[in-house]
Image (cartoon, rainbow, N blue to C red):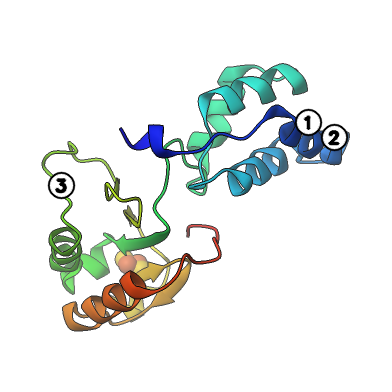
Amino acid sequence: MKSSKVQQIDNSLYDSIIAGYRGKPGDLLSVLEDIQTATPHSYLTEPAIRYVAEKMKVPLSRIYSVITFYSFFNLNPQGDHTVTVCRGTACHTRGSRALLADIMIKLGLNEEETGGETSYTTDDMRFTVRTVACFGQCALAPVIAVDGVIFSHMTSEKLEAIIKKLSSAKKPVRRRNP
Ligand code: FES
């Protein structure tokens, strides 16, 4: 299982993050963001969420509402690189479906098996492929983002070159997912 490969972090780090935002506006959001960033494979584990709820005296339901509202937050381990394919109308009409299919095939991911989710991660944890409803850059369609950097007028050839380059690159500095 992917999650078993992921190293956990101890509560002292959570404590220091929580203490750093105590009494500040937007503290919950900042705490969750920092914990996710500090967690290998950039996600929020259930124990971490429960710990934050207890220490910050915030109902679990509110924390899950925040996590599910912001697409930046992840509840599952993410790959070293994130490729986000826009599936909005403008990008769809300019071929984003084929781009998504191409990248899934190249990375050995199977959309059918994962039941229509919008995030897929390779077994080796190198890549996560996500979809987004619209980047707000429709004039540049089709648009994808790679590790938070937008690429416009994407083609299968350009995408293949990007994947090839990332496959041979070292682990990146993690950024927010768009
Ligand atoms: S539909 Fe893709 S950027 Fe808007």
Residue located beneath label 2 in the image:
19
Examine the rendered structure and indicate whether residue 122 appears above or below residue 67: below
- Disc 1/disc 2 C-alpha distance (Å): 6 Å
- Disc 1/disc 3 C-alpha distance (Å): 39 Å
Q: Nearer the viewer, mark 1 or mark 3?
A: 1
- The mark found on residue 111 in the picture is 3
Residue at the spot x=40%, y=69% of the render? 146
Examine the rendered structure and indicate whether residue 60 appears above or below residue 131: above
Which image quarter: residue 144?
bottom left
Task: Return the residue nearer the eye: 56 or 121.
Answer: 121
- Disc 2/disc 3 C-alpha distance (Å): 41 Å
Q: Which sits earlier in the primary sequence, circle 2 or circle 3?
A: 2
Residue at the spot x=59%, y=26% of the render? 49
**Side (left or right) of 174 relative to 107:** right
Residue located beneath label 1 in the image:
15
Image coordinates of residue 132 in percent, x first then y, are 35, 55
Q: Which sits earlier in the primary sequence, circle 1 or circle 3?
A: 1
Q: Nearer the viewer, mark 1 or mark 2?
A: 1
Q: Residues within 10 Å of mark 1 (few under 14, many from 20)?
A: some
Task: Return the residue nearer the eye: 88 or 165.
Answer: 165
- The mark found on residue 121 in the picture is none
CB-based contact (under 8 Å), mark 1 and mark 2: yes
Look at the image and tell me in which quarter the N terminus lies.
Answer: top left
Residue at the spot x=20%, y=80% of the render? 155
Q: Amino acid at mark 3?
A: Glu
Image coordinates of residue 12 in percent, x first then y, are 76, 31
Determine the secondary structure under disc 1. helix
Determine the secondary structure under disc 2. helix
Q: Amino acid at mark 2?
A: Ala
CB-based contact (under 8 Å), mark 1 and mark 3: no
